[in-house]
Amino acid sequence: MKELIEIGFKKVGEWELNNGVLICNLNNNYPSKNILYSFVCENDIKYIGKSVKSISQRLYGYRKPNKSQTTNYRINKLILEKLKNGIQIEIYLFVDNIGLNFREHKINLAAGLEDNLISEFLPKWNYLGKTIKKTKKTETKDKPNFENTNSRFIYNDNEFENNFVVALGKKYFNDGFFNVRVKHSSFFGKDLSKIKIQLGENPSNYCIGKVNRTANTNQTPRIFAGKEYKSWIQENFERGDLFHVKIIENDFIKLTKKRTPNNA
């Protein structure tokens, strides 16, 4: 916790249970957006997150989430467990008041710090933190779970929260789009927002696609990636192949090849 304060975080409140109802008790109104926040129990950093919303707006999402809001639902359960055991959970906030710029472009300092802080502090409630701890001890092999090759997702990739794998069925192979499963929906932008799609390992090989949240009935994102993506898919894959999606940011993803069902 001392390290957070040195970076610029300050305590702004705590989580409480009021007649069994989870509430976030903030000591003031904090309207700033593009923030970092942290949950701390007994001087132990449990979670670090970033948000383009204000702190009160973001924390509201943890109060009564439904199961489709995967991260909110998971953190809600962890918060409740601590509070029911009489353990206080403090809320810390970092606001970017520095205003860094690069060639007249404003730098989102909160977004840039998040991954570094998670890697450094390894908060137990961040999946990335758990993964880093795990990989420091031993390397694990992928355990594929193949089903029907025409299904949208036929690979259960739980090693990272921000990774998933897509199977190239007929439509995905021919029509230049793919869907995102519910678990990862919150990582993507709003309807009709643009998204940068890196095609393979070369950072200079990318295209600009679009997030559509109306094509699927449950409003999960459908990524329309365009002609460059379609050409890359058809030049480098065959029907039934898998590609791996890594979510860098909510407007930036990287696609790489996974093994095919025949080679699994």
Image (spheres, rainbow, N blue to C red):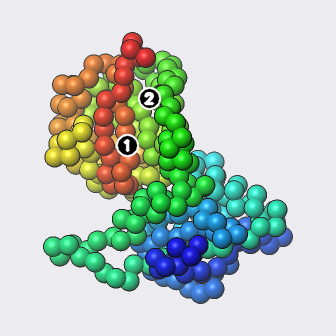
Instruction: Estimate the x, y position of residue 89 in percent, counting from the top left.
Output: 69, 70
Q: Amino acid at mark 1?
A: Lys
Kindly identify the residue that appears in the image at 27 percent across and 19 percent down. 238
**Foreground residue, 116 or 156?**
116
Instruction: Estimate the x, y position of residue 111 in percent, counting from the top left.
Output: 38, 65
Answer with left or right where residue 138 lies relative to residue 90: left
Where residue 33 is drawn, which disc sits there?
none
Kindly identify the residue that appears in the image at 53 percent across and 70 percent down. 37
Disc 2 from disc 1: Cα separation: 16 Å
For mark 1, give the secondary structure.
strand
**Foreground residue, 228 or 46?**
46
Q: Amino acid at mark 2?
A: Arg
Instruction: Estimate the x, y position of residue 252 in percent, counting from the top left.
Output: 31, 51
Asked if residue 211 can be seen in this view, the reply is no
| Among the 4 quarters of the image, the one containing residue 45 | bottom right
- The mark nearer the N terminus, 2 or 1, is 2
Q: Is residue 167 above or below residue 249?
A: above
Residue of label 1: 246
Instruction: Estimate the x, y position of residue 242 in percent, counting from the top left.
Output: 36, 26
| Among the 4 quarters of the image, the one containing residue 92 | bottom right
Q: Residue furthest front?
A: 137
Asked if residue 255 can be seen in this view, the reply is yes
Kindly identify the residue that appears in the image at 16 percent across and 46 percent down. 204
Mark 2 in CB contact with mark 1 (< 8 angstroms) = no
Q: Is residue 186 above or below residue 15?
A: above
Density class for disc 1 (Cα within 10 Å; few <14, some 14-19, many ≥20) is some
**Viewport quadrant of the N terminus:** bottom right
Where residue 152 is drawn, which disc sits there?
2
For mark 2, give the secondary structure.
loop
